């Protein structure tokens, strides 16, 4: 996806990373343009200084597959999507340390003892370039290319490679964060998920998943948006 004005890829104008094959991909970019995604849901608030803080989820696609363990108590899924924060107004460029959290709410009638939801995410690192745009996507030779502009501070891992295991309550709704309180500076940030893999084991009855995204500014203004619930089983 692109933030700002896209620039042409060149041999010395992006950083290359090893390909990630067969697992989820999660990346974050920050800038001062407008995130590009098909909007599924959004929510906003206007702060005391007249700045509008909007949280958006877009391009959401959650698909279920037959569970590899063939258990009637397991549901398995993959998730693609984009979560973005877009701040507009007289002080938008001055925002610092805004925090973005994304995750799921998972609902089910009953869960057996030891029931869990497991999410698998890879590692993705980046560094800052000096171009006038940020472009993140696949480039030739099965490498991931990043062309980054002077829109804010980028660096380090947005999320380490990990397996998230969260125990399910006996029944009801369990909240499972994927990315929690990731700070960014400036007016915009986007996180793109591709083939994030998860499974729920030990839930009895229908399992429903609802993605959410939340932004909290340095001043404490909080915006949260929820995606449409989707039945996994």
Image (cartoon, grey):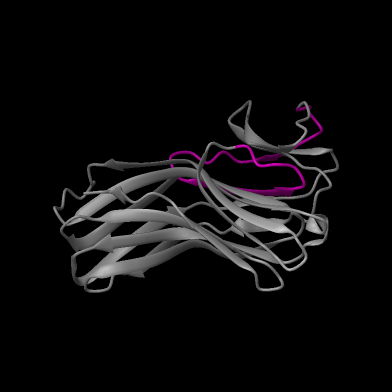
Residue 1 rendering spot, x and y as whole percentages? 63, 36
Residue 186 rendering spot, x and y as whole percentages? 77, 56
Q: Which residues are magenta?
A: 9-36
Determine the image quadrant of residue 147: top right
Residue 150 rendering spot, x and y as whole percentages? 84, 47
Q: Residue at position x 63%, y 49% from top?
A: 190
Does residue 196 lie above or below 215 as drawn? above
Of residue 30 and residue 46, the one placed in the foreground of this image is 46
Residue 65 rendering spot, x and y as whole percentages? 27, 41
Instruction: Give left or right: position of 146 versus 227.
Output: right
Q: Residue at position x 51%, y 51% from top?
A: 122
Number of marks:
0
Q: Residue at position x 28%, y 54% from top?
A: 208
Q: Residue at position x 73%, y 56% from top?
A: 155
Does residue 83 lie above or below 177 as drawn? above
Of residue 85 and residue 75, the one placed in the foreground of this image is 85
């Amino acid at each position: 996806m692109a933030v700002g004005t896209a620039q042409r890829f060149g041999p010395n104008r992006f950083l290359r990373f090893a390909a990630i094959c067969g697992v989820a991909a999660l990346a974050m970019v920050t800038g001062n343009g407008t995130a590009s995604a098909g909007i599924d849901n959004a929510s906003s608030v206007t702060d005391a200084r007249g700045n509008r803080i909007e949280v958006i989820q877009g391009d959401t696609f959650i698909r279920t597959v037959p569970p590899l363990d063939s258990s009637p108590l397991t549901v398995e899924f993959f998730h693609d999507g984009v979560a973005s924060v877009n701040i507009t107004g007289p002080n938008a460029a001055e925002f610092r340390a805004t925090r973005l959290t994304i995750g799921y709410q998972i609902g089910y009638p009953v869960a057996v003892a030891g029931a869990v939801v497991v999410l698998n995410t890879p590692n993705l690192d980046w560094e800052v370039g000096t171009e006038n745009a940020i472009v993140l996507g696949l480039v030739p030779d099965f490498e991931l290319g990043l062309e980054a502009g002077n829109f804010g501070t980028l660096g380090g891992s947005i999320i380490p490679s990990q397996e998230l295991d969260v125990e399910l309550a006996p029944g009801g709704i369990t909240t499972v964060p994927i990315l929690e309180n990731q700070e960014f500076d400036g007016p915009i940030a986007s996180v793109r998920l591709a083939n994030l893999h998860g499974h729920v084991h030990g839930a009895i009855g229908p399992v429903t998943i609802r993605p959410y995204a939340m932004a909290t500014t340095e001043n404490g203004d909080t915006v949260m948006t929820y995606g449409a619930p989707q039945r996994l089983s």
